[in-house]
Amino acid sequence: MTATITDFNQFTELRTAANRNDPAALREVASQFEALFLQTMLKSMREASLGDPIFGNSDQQEMYQGMMDQQLALEMASGKGVGLAEMLVRQLGGEDSARPSRPDGGFPLSAAARSNRVASGKPAPAWSDPKSFAREIWPHAERAGRRLNVAPEAIVAQAALETGWGAHVMPDRSGDSSFNLFGIKAGAGWQGDQVSRQTLEFEGGVPRRQKADFRAYGDVAATFDDYTDFLTDNPRYSDVRDHGEDVAGFANALQASGYATDPRYADKITSIMNSPTMRAVIGELKNPSPQPITARLSAHAD
């Protein structure tokens, strides 16, 4: 059955799992509650409007407005959200609730999670804005672009769409970044780590909430390696490769192959590619500012 934000049975099941000290379930409960709270807040704000809607007030308009509010609430609650989910986790997290939150603003980690993090040496991304996100993934996008014969900026645009320029990368089971920058799901053949998250899928052009398993990686390099293998080894995506500098062709091929169910997936990638933000970021990466003469002389002196 398709999961929805108002399906309280799933909340009960998640709470039961959280009572077994499952940190992932507790985090999911808190995130679901935050999304529901934000959706209710958005609905109340619209009902408080004193003026009539510009385009009338039909049942269809209310239905699509509600769908938009639901998606907006989910986006606002993803990643670090607005802080409500974190507060709930800290209050309901048993002995971990007394511990301070991590310096990077994430959730407190259990002893087992902290031990696993130390053992894996998993780095934490520091993406404060689109430039820092693009700057870190650019070398990997260039490497993937050479293998796929696709412009690296097209790959950066897809990653920016999937993650909101790195701001909404889903966390893994320990609360760290899953580094899943391309929304690749964990199918039956996937043997690595994975994380379950609510997602919005389009069925017959209608968006529906579903719960799906997604792949989790140890770092940025791993996600690009898997992304490249995913598009190279699967015959389904044979038409996605070899588009060179044709970003629109690459985006349209992704959508035609069924990479995403969003009917506007290709348009969104192309729109990001042509945005002022992307032009500024890619321009800086492709044409870095020259060093001052004094800096170059100092480097040669060393």
Image (spheres, rainbow, N blue to C red):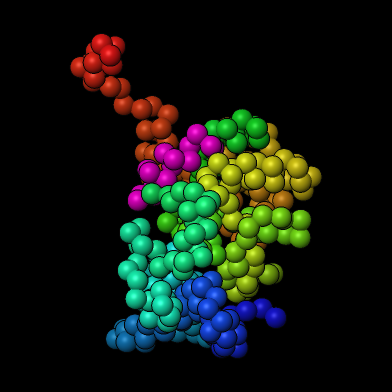
Q: Which residues are magenta?
A: 127-141
Please determine whether, in this image, residue 52 is positioned above or below residue 124: below
Total tally of numbered discs in the picture: 0
User: In the image, is residue 139 part of the stretch drawn in magenta?
Assistant: yes
Where does residue 167 sit, x and y in percent of width and height? 42, 56
Please determine whether, in this image, residue 242 is positioned above or below residue 191: above
Q: Is residue 104 left or right of residue 217?
A: left
| Quarter residue 72 falls in | bottom left
> Residue at left 70%, top 51%?
256
Where does residue 92 sit, x and y in percent of width and height? 42, 82
| Quarter residue 135 falls in | top left
Residue 264 or 75: which is nearer the viewer? 75
Where does residue 78 sit, x and y in percent of width and height? 46, 67
> Residue at left 53%, top 84%?
19
Where does residue 298 sit, x and y in percent of width and height? 23, 15
Please determine whether, in this image, residue 81 is positioned above or below residue 281: below
> Residue at left 34%, top 82%?
45
Please determine whether, in this image, residue 138 is positioned above or below residue 168: above
Q: Is residue 232 left or right of residue 24?
A: right
Q: Tell me which secondary structure the magenta stretch mostly adopts.
A: helix
> Residue at left 48%, top 41%?
137
